[in-house]
Image (cartoon, grey):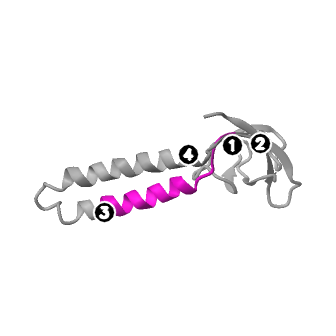
Amino acid sequence: MTTERRSVEASSFGHETVGMTASVTPFDRPARLRRAASIFGLFLLGALLTLPVPGLHLVAPPVFLIAGFVFARRRLRQELQIQGIAGPCPACGAPQQLPAPSPPTFPATLPCPGCGEFLKLDELR
């Protein structure tokens, strides 16, 4: 998978909007299908391994299967993953290296490590 640089718009309450650069990994349809299948396979394995365990065999396999569907669906819909964001903070103006937000998609809200102001980050289209 390749990492791309994309322009990001960063804003903070009461301050001018500034541009930042984000390192992102885009996922095409086959990559998203592979990622979804791999996470579902892990949960399916968990369901199969807990099936013969007395006491757990009634609760754990359905929970594993439902969780597998939920996480696989989430990975199937994830078109990109943010690796990191760099640029000046709109509040303090200092250059910052921001970590990947959780969840690693846009729009995202992160605190500035320098001044503590919350930054709203959105990808420029």
Upstream in the sequence, badge 3 or badge 1? 3
Disc 4 and disc 2: Cα gap in Å?
22 Å
| Label annotation for residue 6 | 2
Which residue appears at 20% of the width and 54% of the height? 50
| Mark 1 surroundings: few (<14), some (14-19) or many (≥20) residues within 10 A | some
* Part of the protein shown in magenta: 64-84
- Specify which label sits upstream in the sequence, 4 or 2: 2
| Sequence-earlier tag: 2 or 1 | 2
Nearer the observer: mark 4 or 2; the answer is: 4
Mark 1 and mark 4 in contact? Answer it, CB < 8 Å.
Answer: no
Labels 3 and 2 touching (C-beta < 8 A)? no
Q: How far is mark 4 from mark 3, CA to CA?
A: 27 Å
Q: Amino acid at mark 3?
A: Val
Magenta stretch encompasses residue 81: yes
Q: Secondary structure at mark 2?
A: strand
> Disc 4 residue type?
Pro
Q: Position of residue 113 (x, y in %)?
A: 69, 43
Find residue 47 and name its label: none
State left or right for residue 38 relative to residue 103: left
Amino acid on which disc 2 is placed: Arg
Most frequent secondary structure within the magenta stretch: helix
Q: Residue 3 appears in which quarter of the rendering?
A: top right
Residue at which label 3 appears = 63
**Residue depicted at 58% across the width and 51% down the height:** 102
x, y percent for residue 108: 67, 55
In the picture, measured across the screen, residue 113 lies left or right of residue 44, that is right
Quadrant for residue 13, please give it: bottom right
Q: Dot 3 lies on which element?
A: helix
* Sequence order check, earlier mark of 3 and 2: 2
